[in-house]
Image (cartoon, helix red, strand yellow):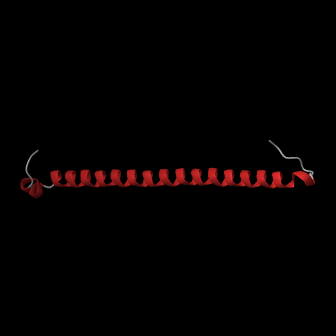
Amino acid sequence: MNTPDFEFPHYADVQDHIRRARLERSVAVAEAFATLVHKVVVWVKAFASRMSDGLAAENDRRAIEADVFLRRSVGRR
């Protein structure tokens, strides 16, 4: 519902109420969007960290398998 550009003096309170309600709704939508973006960023960081840890472990395993002396000290799977 759009309010007209011109003011009605006897509807001023109602128009103020509508403006405040729109502002509150805008703030609520913006806050929800910001929360969603924050959670996605946190999830992506956690996922990248887990992938990095797995890659580091795989690199360590390959280094151990490639080294003749370390391979003897590690049991077989």
Among the 4 quarters of the image, the one containing residue 16: bottom right
Q: Say which of 23 and 40 sits in front.
A: 23
Indicate the position of residue 63 as horizontal and vertical percent values: 20, 54
Is 23 on the left-hand or right-hand side of 4?
left
Q: Is residue 7 visible?
A: no
Among the 4 quarters of the image, the one containing residue 70: bottom left
Instruction: Name, please, the residue furthest toward the top.
Output: 1
State the quadrant of the C terminus: top left
Q: Residue at x 68, y 54 (%)?
A: 24
Q: Residue at x 28, y 55 (%)?
A: 56
Q: Say which of 27 and 10 sits in front.
A: 10
Q: Residue at x 22, y 55 (%)?
A: 60
Q: Is residue 71 visible?
A: yes
Is 24 on the left-hand or right-hand side of 43?
right
Q: Residue at x 58, y 51 (%)?
A: 32
Is 56 on the left-hand or right-hand side of 39?
left
How many numbered marks appear? 0
Is 69 on the left-hand or right-hand side of 37?
left
Indicate the position of residue 72 as horizontal and vertical percent values: 6, 54
Indicate the position of residue 33 as horizontal and vertical percent values: 58, 50
